[in-house]
Amino acid sequence: MSWRIAVRHRTGYQYGSPARASYNEVRMTPATSSGQHLLTSRLEIRPEARTLRYVDYWGTQVHAFDVHVPHTELMVTATSVVETAGPRPDPPDPGWAALADPRVTDEFSELLAPSRYVVAEDEVDAVAVELRSAGSPLETGRAAVRWVHENLDYVRGATSVGTTSAEARALGKGVCQDFTHLALALLRSAGLPARYVSGYLHPSRDAHLDEPVSAESHAWVEFWAGDWVPLDPSSLAEVAERHVLVARGRDYSDVRPLAGIYSGPAAESLGVAVQLTRLR
């Protein structure tokens, strides 16, 4: 079953005194990808700035812009309409021998290695060995995501955007970003190429048409077992029509919605406001 979803995502920064210049990248436009089609999109920036649009190394649409006038506030609002699809069937299981092929390990080397927020740990390696010995690549991938869901509690405010998978595991709690980072650590340790996916999750399975609801940015994983398999470790919801995909990468550092540098005083985040509306 397909959905049509309108997305409004607003975020930005406020400065104690005017910033002289800023250089920014925005990753807030949903992707056209397998199971999803972007119908319309618009980006509004205050102060006004001209954008350069490109696709990054991981296939994410990026808008880059500079602001060269003094400003005390930077606000970015992305609006879009996207059509999503129901769940995809699992690919045929390739077996562990196929995943060990040097051509596969070379192609996905960056998604098998630790990264900034995905940390190698002996504790995670031990779990990975146990899960891998008990099943096929597909079974191991699903078991890894369930393990994370069962071993972390969803607690807002317990972690920050800079928390690593190892820190979240030690705390035993976190939010969707932490669930995703720990799942990536476990999947990669098991020999499954795995990537971070950012986007949105409509909170209601029975959403009323044309009724805006407050939501948040969301994160889940995709692991490779002959093809990409998406799983949501924090909710265990099937990745399907309620999920809107925006960006992919090794971890959160590759998919930050608004990132950049500026010249001026310390900045305070204005927070994030996300609104989702099911249109069809």
Image (cartoon, rainbow, N blue to C red):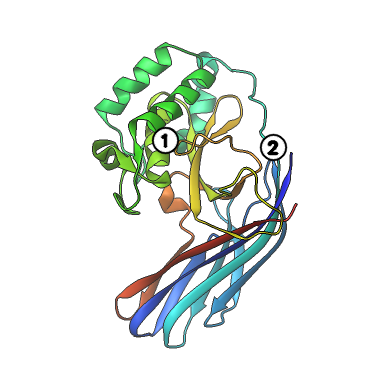
Residue 230 vs 100, above or below: the answer is below
- Residue that label 2 marks: 86
Disc 1 versus disc 2: distance between alpha carbons? 24 Å
Residue at image point 34% right, 38% down: 153
Percent x, y of residue 106: 49, 31
**Given the current orientation, which residue lies at the most extreme top position?**
134
* Number of the front mark, 1 or 2: 2
- The amino acid on which the numbered mark 2 sits, given as a three-letter code, is Gly
For the residue carrying disc 1, how many other residues have a C-alpha within 10 Å: few (<14), some (14-19), or many (20+)? many
Percent x, y of residue 60: 58, 53
Residue 73 or 194: which is nearer the viewer? 73
Q: Quadrant of residue 188?
A: top left
Residue at image point 54% right, 21% down: 138
Q: Are marks 1 and 2 in contact (CB under 8 Å)?
A: no
Q: Is residue 4 visible in this depiction of the protein? A: yes
Residue 127 or 115: which is nearer the viewer? 127
> In this rendering, would 209 be left or right of 257?
right
Residue at image point 42% right, 35% down: 184
Badge 1 element: helix
> In this rendering, would 212 be left or right of 128?
right
Residue at image point 75% right, 51% down: 280
Mark on residue 184?
Answer: 1
Residue 204 or 52: which is nearer the viewer? 204
Q: Mark 2 or mark 1, which is nearer the start of the sequence?
A: 2
Residue 40 or 26: which is nearer the viewer? 40
Badge 2 element: loop
Percent x, y of residue 29: 61, 59
> In this rendering, would 154 be left or right of 94?
left
Mark on residue 213?
Answer: none
The quadrant of the rendering that contains the N terminus is top right
Q: Is residue 113 visible in this depiction of the protein? A: no
